[in-house]
Image: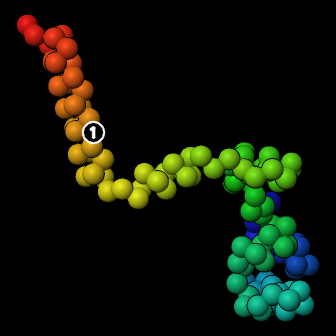
């Protein structure tokens, strides 16, 4: 069964798998009766309320565990990515060459680079 047919079934419309005027009118009426903006557009909130799709299904497993246990999801990757994006890429390159140069000078100074 397609999403359109499932939506039509949940609205009480004959499931034809075609988005027609009857389906749009039924959706507009349903939205108005349930306190949504009666636009006739199948927005994500309306589709979730009609149980056509699950917005949590595409979430990472840490969010599923968080919803089940009540513990906040892990955020190390998100925080690390945010911190990395605060510094321009050219600055990371300059720092990389700088630390590489310092490591080379230290290596040479200890006599391991003398040949």
> Residue at the spot x=72%, y=45% of the render?
61
Say above or below: 11 vs 38: above
- Near mark 1 (Cα within 10 A), the count class, few <14, some 14-19 or many ≥20, is few
User: In this view, which residue lies farthest toward the left?
Assistant: 115
> Residue at the spot x=85%, y=67% of the render?
51
Q: Quadrant of residue 9?
A: bottom right
On screen, residue 44 versus residue 10, left or right, reads: left
- Provide residue 7's location: percent of width, then percent of height: 81, 72
- Provide residue 105's location: percent of width, then percent of height: 17, 25
On screen, residue 18 versus residue 68, left or right, reads: left
Which is nearer the eye, 62 or 51? 62
Q: Quadrant of residue 18?
A: bottom right
Which is nearer the eye, 95 or 70? 95
Q: Quadrant of the C terminus?
A: top left
> Residue at the spot x=78%, y=77% of the render?
46
User: In this view of the protein, can residue 29 be seen by the observer?
Assistant: no
- Provide residue 49's location: percent of width, then percent of height: 84, 73
Which is nearer the eye, 114 or 1? 114
Return the residue at label 1: 96
Q: Quadrant of the N terminus?
A: bottom right
Say above or below: 113 vs 36: above
> Residue at the spot x=90%, y=90% of the render?
33
């Amino acid at each position: 069964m397609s999403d359109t047919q499932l939506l039509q079934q949940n609205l009480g419309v004959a499931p034809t798998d075609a988005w027609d005027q009857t389906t749009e009118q039924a959706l507009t009426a349903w939205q108005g009766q349930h306190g949504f903006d009666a636009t006739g557009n199948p927005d994500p909130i309306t589709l979730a309320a009609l149980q056509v799709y699950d917005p949590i299904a595409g979430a990472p497993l840490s969010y599923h565990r968080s919803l089940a246990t009540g513990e906040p999801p892990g955020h190390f990757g998100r925080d690390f990515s945010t911190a990395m994006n605060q510094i321009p890429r050219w600055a990371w390159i300059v720092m990389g060459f700088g630390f590489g140069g310092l490591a080379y000078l230290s290596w040479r100074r200890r006599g391991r680079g003398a040949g």
